[in-house]
Amino acid sequence: MSQASVAAGRGLPEYVTRRPGGFYRSVNPSTKLAIAALEVVAAFAVPGWPVPIAILAVVVATAVAARRLRGLVVVALAASPIIGSILLVNLFLLPGASDPIVRLGPLAPTWSGLWFGLQTVLRLFAFSAAITLVYLTTAIDDLLADLARRGLGRRAVFVVGAAVQMVPRTVERAAEIVDAQRARGLDTEGRFWRRARGVLPLAAPVVFGALTEVEERTMALEARAFSAPGRQTRLRVPVDGAMDRALRWAAIVALVAVVGLRIVGKLG
Amino acid sequence: MTAKHSAEPKLPAPAAPLDPPAPSIQFEAVSFAYPDGTQALVDVSLRIAPGESVAIVGQNGSGKSTLVRHLNGLLRPTSGRVLLDGLDVRGVHVARLAERVGLAFQNPDRQLFAGRVSAEIAFGPRNLGVRGAALDERVSRALDAVGLSAEAASNPYDLGYSRRKLLALASVLAMRTPVLVLDEPTTGQDARGVARVRAVVAAAVGEGRTVVAISHDMRFVAECFRRVVVMGAGRVVLDGAPEVVFAEDAWPALRATYLEPPLPAVAGARLGLGATPTQAVFVAALRRASTKSR
Amino acid sequence: MAIELSAVRYRYAGASKTALGSVDLSVEPGRVLGIVGANESGKSTLCLVAGGLAPRAIGGRLEGSVRIDGADTAAMRSHELAQRCGLLFQNAAAQLSGTTGTVYEEVAFGPCNLGLAVADVIERVWWALGTVGVEDLAPRDPARLSGGQAQLVALASVLALRPRYLILDEPTSELDPAGTALVADALARVARETGAGILLVEHKTDVLARIADDVAVLADGSVALAGPAAEVLADPRLAGFGVEPPARVRLEREVRASGLEWSAALAEAIE
């Protein structure tokens, strides 16, 4: 019996039908999205310290249990320059603050600035951690399959998938471009102001390359009947158990409640 | 026995000896592993003399691109040393090495950014400090060498892919580096484009430059290069003149790296004519054999 | 039953000169038609026009008719076109959808787009993978394939739509000799086993010498020479059109030109 008929007799191969395993990784992707949405909104909508701290703690604990803490730390480190500068802006330039910590000539960092800045930093870390956790515990094809099953059109699904794929591909392409320009004498290791001259030779090929590829990829999609009418056949069906549904609805209800309470002004 | 090259267009004699002269290149037990753990080069030791013309061949993934990127410092060995004129290039910035080693990439679209062909070509020499009339002269000579003089004011993306490749080649030629490294210069070219590339290689060799080229085109390799380095799985598998590397006793090693010798070599071996890597050598050997049999 | 181009003229949007000027060509089922010519002679344009993508996807003006099995391509919807005529380009990586985690799902992409039943999808995927000879690549990540493998997977994913015709624009140009041989053999097998008609644009005339039945030479947007592959590839006018003849042809020509006799032993030696 040929491999083909054996396979057809067996159905879809296991590498297509396998479900993700592991703590939090096996949770339905849309549920994870709903939870992240709740975390993100609550981190900013609820004033005070306890809620952002609690959210950050929950996300970190989940990451540890799902063995994805390292990825979280990497993103936190990558985000810290931006977040750190927000702290500095608040520290020195909070409008209406009049309780300086110390005077350094024209600069006067204030206690209220520090307080508010730290709180903002905490919220931002909670926000980015929540989003990163979804990214770290969800395979893109499972997410796409779930979105497709919930009725998201094939074009939207493709756009999401392609956008996510585009990041590593663009990074790879950018690395090649940097190499090519360095080989022509562009200085990327020397003094900063010389390096600043290199923006156009580095940015332009990335953009042009992405644009030319769009046309080719569009034609390739059409060549695979992407515009055919009707429903796409789904091979990958992500799990959506009772617990997943319950969690998802709880998260959505809580999200609506938080937003509602905030609008009505009941959150203090 | 020297390899004979098929007739190349006559070139003007070089105006002056190469300045700075081509360096000697040495790989000393160079190994290289990518960050994800792939071992791309394993204990490679090679010496390339000033002015040599070397072709690097091998299957995709055999380490060819990795090897040549060590020549201009884009990659640094994880162990071993790369020496230019006896000096370790380890601490030298890529931008400095670009004064001596010019590398033309396989995919021209990874470098094109200027709105005009002439500006694109001027980028390299400008980075090396060339200005004014000298810069203009370099640009126009480079355009001439690849046959794109008529397109000096065109937008690079108005040229087809094969001419963009020639443009990328010109932009490296304009840097006038003593070492010229070409990554797959003939893929995607039609017959005229290939002839241009061959002329460029011949001119560079004639000027005393060291020319290193990665290629899949065994005919181009056998006819234009004096030395062939065959790579397989990160190691040097064969290294010698074309008549040695494409000779019958080397075929098993060649085929183990999924390469085939060029047709003249195969035909010559079948007819017992000895090592005939190129058409010209084959015909000469055939003539000798037929006059002998008279 | 063929892809028939009749009196086709095509001009790109905003271009001053025609890219194709009065081309008459046909691609027959089960036969491989090789297209050669200098760069910018219109070969890629021919692929887009014959495959129905020009002017549909890229604009421009088309005169004359392009018919697939008698039906005008202009009247077809793009998914109908995809099931009659598959298109493949040079850059394999750009042709993979980029949204699938396994080669299996990549090849299933087309049939799934058509909404076929799962059992039919499975059958088509294995058939396509088997015809191209890449069943063992099925569990692999499409983003991690070599150039030759990616090109074969792209071929399989287009085949999964069971087109009667395939149009390929320099599919081997970025591949090493091993990858080139894989793709060439796969194409020959597809033509033989499925009866598909293949239009193959190639610089590597050695490949065409091996697998093409007929060859047409394009120069300045029109067909300058056409006929059986062996004849056209040995035609002395080929070099004038910017096309390098196959190695065998060149060797024989050189031997004869130097006044030596071309014996049967020689002919055998270059087989």
Image (cartoon, rainbow, N blue to C red):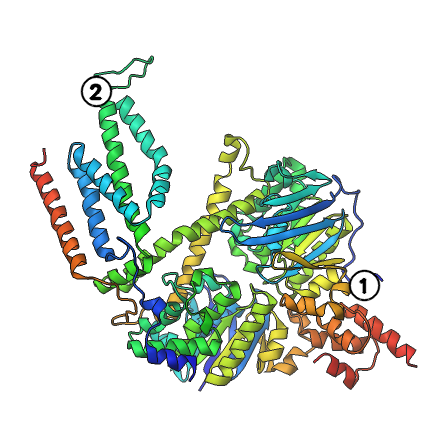
Subunit bearing disc 1: B
Q: Tell me which residue sits at (39%, 53%) in the image.
A: A166
Q: Tell me which residue sits at (32%, 57%) in the image.
A: A140
Subunit bearing disc 2: A
Say if B18 sits above or below C17 in the image.
above
User: Does dot 2 land on a helix, a strand or a loop?
Assistant: loop
User: Does dot 1 land on a helix, a strand or a loop?
Assistant: loop
According to the picture, the residue beneath numbered tag 1 turns out to be B4
Say if B21 sits above or below B278 in the image.
above
Q: Position of residue A22 (x, y in %)?
A: 29, 55
Q: Position of residue C95 (x, y in %)?
A: 43, 64
Residue C186 versus residue B89: which sits nearer the camera? B89
The label number, if any, that marks residue A97 in the structure image? 2
Q: Quadrant of the N terminus of chain B?
A: bottom right
Q: Tell me which residue sits at (81%, 71%) in the image.
A: B274
Hey, what amino acid is under mark 1? Lys
Q: Position of residue A239 (x, y in %)?
A: 23, 63
The answer to whether residue B57 is seen in the rendering is: yes
Say if A92 sits above or below A152 in the image.
above
Judge left or right: residue C22 versus residue B95: left
